[in-house]
Amino acid sequence: MFSGVTSRPARHMSAAVALLAIGAVGCADVIDSAKDGAKKVVRQRSVFSLDTGDCYNPNAGVGDGTEVSVEVVPCTEAHKGQVVGEFSVDEKSEYPGDAELSKLADTGCPPETQKFVSDPWAVPEGVGLFIYYPTKESWTTGDRAVSCTYAKESGTFAGSLKNTSLDADQLAYLKGADAVYQAFWNNQPEADQIEKDLPGYKKQAKAVSKALDAHLASLKSVDQPETVKLRAQLGEAAEAWKDAASAGSIDDFYIAYDMAFTGIDPQKSVAARKELKLATTVPADDAEVWAS
């Protein structure tokens, strides 16, 4: 994750200065290199002015620390990342610190990115969520913006991640499915053992069951066979999550949770996704979690 932005202004160099700096060497590869350098200079933009949809290359490397400016490039060119959402931390008067800002970003960015990237399964392999948020210094200048980006630490990708031309059935499925997994991850208890925080795990179960109910309601309008079959499976999972949420003992919770957890295994949605003409490759992180 990016550690944030600073209040120090980016140092800009004009393209003319960059070109004059090569002197009169006359070497073609030096001139080409200088032109590339000049193009990069011209494309520099302060992290304060990034807009949703901008494709960019970080100067410090993805996740390598504080950024002052980045190179904004056409999305048709190979690039490291794209800004896919943003929001402001206006409810805090004092600087909340890196840990709190990171937590706010983890909660605030998923719903913002979902507006831009409707299907996270369609995101290229190796591309993950990275965030720009204020530093203590930039906070004093009024900086409250959190920029949510999808970026690739190794290599590049081309094209915009924005989903377009999705039909009503696709949108209904994606909105509900995203809400279910956000409910699961955003309510994940810190304790890695249920015995250490049964109330926390029951709270998570309640949130997931609520999201599943909404997902099931939205899928009623989709009458394609594989999606109808998935809805029936998710209905059973929703009941299991409700049983887990109301479990009176740890043993009761375990019995319900086993069925509830496997019931939302992303692999079980592949056939419906194929039918809906959506991406069908389970993201590596999700595949690993449910495989274990």
Image (cartoon, helix red, strand yellow):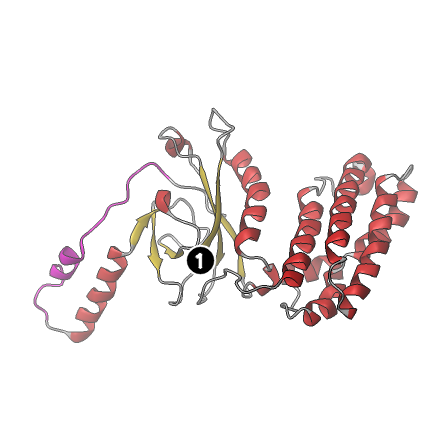
Q: Nearer the viewer, residue 204 or 91?
A: 91
**Magenta stretch: dominant secondary structure:** loop
Q: Is residue 292 left or right of residue 112?
A: right
Q: Looking at the picture, how far across and down is residue 188, in whole percent?
A: 71, 43
Q: Looking at the picture, how far across and down is residue 13, in whole percent?
A: 20, 51
Q: Is residue 193 magenta?
A: no
Q: Nearer the viewer, residue 188 or 174?
A: 174
Q: Nearer the viewer, residue 72 or 169?
A: 169
| 66 over 286 or under it: above or below | above
Report which quarter residue 280 is drawn in: bottom right
Q: Is residue 264 left or right of residue 103?
A: right
Q: Is residue 175 left or right of residue 7?
A: right
Q: Residues within 10 Å of mark 1 (few under 14, many from 20)?
A: many
Q: Looking at the picture, how far across and down is residue 54, in whole percent?
A: 40, 55
Q: Looking at the picture, how far across and down is residue 105, in whole percent?
A: 54, 41
Residue found at the very far left of the displayed protein: 24
Q: Which residue has dot 1 on it?
A: 81
Residue drawn at x 75%, y 62% is 291
Amino acid type, callout 1:
Gly
Q: Is residue 233 left or right of residue 179?
A: right
Residue drawn at x 38%, y 34% is 138
Q: Nearer the viewer, residue 105 or 272?
A: 272
Report which quarter residue 40 is drawn in: bottom left
| 161 over 271 or under it: above or below | above
Quadrant of the rendering where the C terminus is positioned? bottom right
As helix, strand or loop, the secondary structure at mark 1 comes to strand
Q: Which residues are magenta?
A: 6-25
Residue drawn at x 43%, y 42% is 4
